[in-house]
Image (spheres, grey):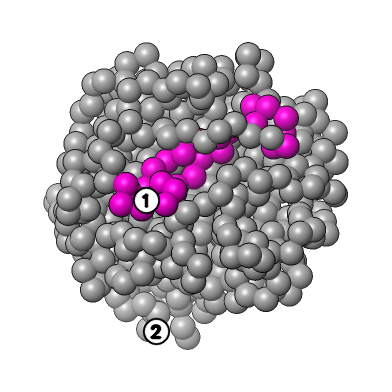
Amino acid sequence: MKKIFHLLLLIVMPFLTYSQELAVTEQSGIESEISIAVNPNNSDEIIIASMGSDSPIIIYTSSNGGDSWSQTSFGNGIADPVLTYGDNNTAYLTFLDFGTTLEMHLAESTDNGLTWNTEALTLDGQAADRQWIKRDNSINSDYYGNIYLSYFHPQGVTDIHIVKVDEAGNVGDNHPIHSTPYNYVQNPAMDLNSSGDIVICFIAEDTGGNRKIIAVNSVDGSETFSAETIVTDLYMFNSSGDPVVDVVGFAPGPSSRLGNSLQMAIDKSSGQYSGRVYLSWTDFVESNPNEGMNVYLSYSDDNGLSWSTPMTVNDDNVPSSHQYYAGIDVNSTGILSISWYDRRTDPTDDALTDFYFTYSSDGGENFKTSTRVNTISSDHTAVTDGLATFGVGEYTSLASTENEVYLVWSDGRENDGDMDVYFAKVNLEDVNSITEIKLEPSLVIDNLFPNPVKNGKTQLVINSIHTGEIEISLMDVDGKSVKNENSTINVIGENVLDLDLSKIPQGNYVIKIKHSSGFASKKITVIK
């Protein structure tokens, strides 16, 4: 695999005990479709991935439990980031490349997300979409180390597919996971139990035009799958495939980004509910869309062959308000955590949006009173005010450790069309104390001009909140250093540094700046 090094930006801020609401970054435009993963061997190592409005993948990494963050980004025209972490201290990321007809990629990082190796997966010649990724971390599994990626075809064949990559990196065959023909399929959600069995749920429209959630499982490492089981009927879309209600914040017109957003988590603890499969989704109340969207939950104790009656997770008691796009996870002690976007404070205008969290310690039978995580609401009317059509995307996620839950969401509280990634850490023993802190970058490369460099001379415009010595490194695309020098940031704020690259061969490089409080880097091209 080819190793790629990109932008690094350190952001520093201390945490309080509960949940500190942190703006992880301030990118321009919309950041959404956020995924988070935690190293199972070290809960201080956290990675967040989001999709930017101009379609780079933006990665945030923390090695101290969220007390400080680094930022890296790569690519244009790529989307749908999904993360998972192996017990081999390796993080895995899958994303789609729009430049190659929705080619699906698999990336790996052994340094907690600071650098990534990435390659395209060999599929079946068709485009992929809404992919999901999990690694088998169960040492008792016959398929330990396998990585599984599920996806669907946005054009052509209407199948949910799966492809696996073994521990040696060999890409196996990809094939459908169901035999029943459907008019429409989308949104596979997947997890593995402690024996390595796979459960996948997906949205399907049958030949009669009815939408349902379908479940299947595999007990042989994805080689074969069980017959399909119906989890529940869905009511969000009409017979023409359009949402029954236009919901502010997804897109102008017919809510084109609105979806059921399936999320799955399996209890891998040794507790009472070990093996229980939890599935959450968004939907309208049957036959009464005026009651708004809810976050629903169902569970299975037999690997998805049968399911409990769906229950509503949100406790807003405002029937007309919308709740949607849950994140879901089960920690090592069996506690189930769920988060979601919530409009209970503004059911009339359907615009002001908050982010809520709750958890269950009895297998999803009962939930604690939900907690509002953010302190300032976002007006989602501003998100789609003729400027943007993506809104909060189609999913979010959360991650949990034995004692804490890590929450991420897309937040537009400035109400200017910009949406940033926010992060909160919840201590399960104290979920009622919230302190908001918005992080600011400590070191930023504002400009690099000219770029490409044609005559060997260029200028770096750096903005810093600290003075002092800095180290400037120029690296090739494989991460090998080709030039190093030291300089000084003399004033807080803007500094202009001259850089001589006249002895550097023609090619593509990354320039990295480091000082005591942070990092920044930027791609640069040298032309002779």
Q: Nearer the viewer, residue 474 or 117?
A: 117
| Residue extent of the magenta highlight | 276-305
Q: Is residue 312 above or below residue 130?
A: above
Image coordinates for residue 201, horizontal then vertical, percent: 64, 47
Q: Determine whether the residue tagged by mark 1 lies in a helix, strand or loop.
A: loop
Image coordinates for residue 463, horizontal then vertical, percent: 21, 56
Which label is found at residue 179?
A: none
Q: Quadrant for residue 146, please give it.
A: top right
- Local packing at callout 1 (Cα closer than 10 Å; few below 14, some 14-19, many 20+) is few
Which residue does the numbered mark 2 point to in the structure image?
Answer: 454
The type of residue carrying mark 1 is Asn
Q: What residue sits 57% from the left and 57% below the top?
A: 211
Q: Is residue 454 above or below residue 379?
A: below
Q: Is residue 170 visible?
A: yes
Q: What residue sits 59% from the left and 53% below the top?
A: 212
Q: Is residue 145 above or below residue 457?
A: above
Is 424 placed left or right of 100 in the picture?
left
Q: Determine whether the residue tagged by mark 2 lies in a helix, strand or loop.
A: loop
Label 2 close to label 1 by CB (< 8 Å): no
Q: What residue sits 23% from the left and 73% below the top?
A: 386
Q: Nearer the viewer, residue 64 or 404?
A: 404
How far apart, in angstroms, are the residues tagged by discs 2 and 1? 64 Å
